[in-house]
Every structure is written in structure tokens, then in C-alpha cells.
Image: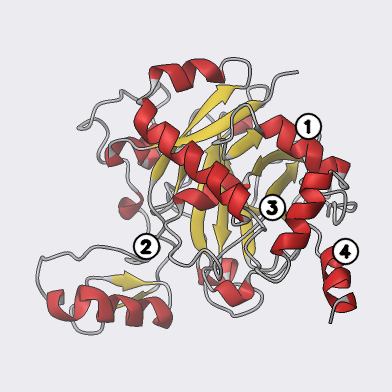
Amino acid sequence: MAVDLGFVEKCEPWRLESRFFPSKAGGRPAWLDLKNIPGKGDLECEYCGDPCVFLCQIYAPYEEDVDAFHRTVYIFVCKNTDCCRPNQNGNLKVFRSQLGRINDFYLAEPPVEQKDWGTDIDVSRWAKTCRVCGILAPNHCGRCKVVNYCCRVHQVYDWKNGHKNACGTEATNGNGFLFPEYEIVIERDDTATERVERNDPSGEQTEMEKYNAMIQDGKAGTFQNEDVNDDLLQMANDEKDETFAEFRTKIDSYPDQILRYDRGRKVLYISSHNQITDVPKCPECDGDRQFEFQIMPQLLNFLDLKDVIKCLDWGILAVFTCKQSCMPKSKYIREYIWKQDIVQEESESKINQNT
């Protein structure tokens, strides 16, 4: 059966606002429930305690469930590279939010995709959000009392990066803290070729060539550790890991895919090692969770990471959500995410034998 594939594309920023129910990567989250949004306590990295930053969101309604007429899944990641640990998920958070067709925030009819339509549908009407990252922000600048922050770390960052000079004025400063913002366009894998043909080939081809070059250089996905580069690449070339070989075969047709949406079916693992075997049950209803989608390593190419050696990294990020998509009592309910990297045991063993 065909899998839905996700690709990033640039678009006008207004199209990525909550009123249009976007799937997007980077920038601030486009919240679905505009009132009960997560804060620092919900998003703290398990390793450093800083709030995780928005990575991407997927709009994925359950057509068969009236309570999930609108439904979005959000992924957040800690930007501290020291917290990015192989095959560990403590630096990642995933949340699900859903609403019925009749709700407190949106009209029952589909939105009109015009820049000036529904501009009053905005989180600022219901909650104060962090100027830096866009999550719930209970604190404000002590001087101007206008700008809000989720934590001291983000307030200090903003002060050093423009607010010191703009405080008390209407001036705004750019936000270099967040990841670059893109729309995530979803295509069936049997029709994705049409997308490549109808889009501007220059930018698309550039990213594809960049990814292929990074694979060859050992810098894509979990190939960024120089100590194990040669061994991992040799493993791939020798196809000693059949799972990795299958992974490469599946993505070769569309090497720029950043998402594979395959709800209720199987994860496309990048390695036969460190596969998830025990997915926790839903904390709301105690029901089973199922695989919904995975984020691919290709997304790393679009995050504007300055250091390709010491930076965020993953092989795949697999998201598991409540099979029944139960109605959250807390509005934004934690779901489960598993980070799988290329296995390092074999290569580390070889390195140890050579030292």
C-alpha cells in the first residue's frame, strides 16, 4: 500500500498560521488548541532542563472520529547538542492536540486561503506566548512589560540578540534561535514524481544533490561522528545490515523526503539494531499506541545547522500515538517518540580492536 511522503517547501509565512491548519517545519508552532498550550514544564529536556524547541507538526485528522475532526501532532527537540545521545529520546517531546468540527476557535466551514481571512484566529487572543520559541510564557520583560518569555534562558537570549536596544519601542528584532520555517507538503509515494516535475527544479535538485553528497561524505543522518564514519559507511557498502539496505532502497526514489506517514503499519527502520519493542500505553485512556509517522534524516539538511559534525542528529524519529486517538483531557497530550540511530556497537568494537 502507498505511503504518504512529506517534502519541505518554502511558502508565504501567513499560510503557515493556525487558521489554515498547516503541516510545517521550523519557526514557531501553529497551535491547534489556541488556549491550553504547553509550557516549559511540559517541554523540559530530560538532560539539561531547557525547553525543547519546535521542530515540526503534522496535521492528521481522524476522518472516522468526530472528536478528531481537526488533529495535529507536534514534535519538539532540545537544541543543546550535548543532549543528542545515540538511540535515546530524552531530548525529544511529542504532543497530540485535537478538536471537533464545532469548537471554540475555528469556524465549522473550511478556511479561505487568503492573507486577510480570519486574522483574528490567533493564539494571542487566548494565551501569552514566548517571544523566542512560541510556547506558553508566564513571565514578561520587567522593563517594557510587553514581551513575554517561557524561561530565563530565552529572556537572556532575546536581550542579547536585539531586545536590549528595542525594549520599550515598537521595533522588532529577527529570531535566529528557531529553525528555518517551511511548509510540509504531503504526497502519495506513487504520485510524488509529479511534484518533482511541477516544482522549480533548481532548488529541489540542489537539496537532493546536497543530501546525496552528505551520504557519500558520511554526514547525513547519524553519519556525523568522524570516529565511526569509515566503519559505518563500510557496513552500508557491504550491506551487512539488511535493514539499512532496505531503508536506502525505499528512499532512493525520493531522497528529499523528510516524512513517511504510514499510520497503523510499520516503521521503516534504518538499522536492525535498537528497534523499539515496547511502546508505552496512552496515559489518557491506557489504550495501545500505534505507529503513525516518522521523520527522516533528510530534514536535518533544512535546519540550517552550522556545524555538521557536532549538531543535532538522528537516523529516524518514529512517532507512536494513541490508536483510538482518545479525546485529551489536558488538551495537549504527550505521545511517544523513539529516536533510532545507525548502530555503533560494531564500529566501536572495530575501533577498540585497532587501538
Name the spot of residue 308 as percent of width and height, x first.
52, 63
How far separated are the C-alphas under marks 2 and 4? 46 Å
Tell how many labels.
4
Label 4: element kind: helix
Mark 4–mark 1 contact, CB under 8 Å? Answer: no
Describe the element under mark 3 as helix, strand or loop.
loop
Q: Are marks 3 and 2 in contact (CB under 8 Å)?
A: no
Looking at the image, residue 2 sits to the left or right of residue 242; the answer is: left
Disc 3 versus disc 2: distance between alpha carbons? 32 Å
How far is the residue under mark 3 from the one under mark 4? Answer: 16 Å
Alpha-carbon distance for marks 1 and 3? 21 Å
Tell me: 194 left or right of 95.
left
The image position of residue 310, as x and y in percent, is: 55, 71
Question: Which residue was labeled with disc 1?
Answer: 264
Marked residue nearer the N-terminal end (4 or 1): 1
| Residue occupied by mark 4 | 346
Instruction: Tell me the kind of residue under disc 2.
Output: Thr
The first of marks 3 and 2 along the sequence is 2
Instruction: Residue type at mark 3: give it.
Output: Gly
Disc 2, disc 1: CB below 8 Å? no
Query: Mark 4 is on which residue type?
Result: Glu
Q: CA distance from mark 2 to mark 1?
A: 34 Å
Q: Earlier in the sequence, mark 2 or mark 1?
A: 2
Q: Could you tell me which quadrant the N terminus lies in?
A: top right
Q: In the image, which disc is placed on residue 315?
A: 3
Q: Quadrant of residue 169?
A: bottom left
Residue that sits furthest to the front in the current view: 354
Mark 3 vs 4, N-terminal side: 3
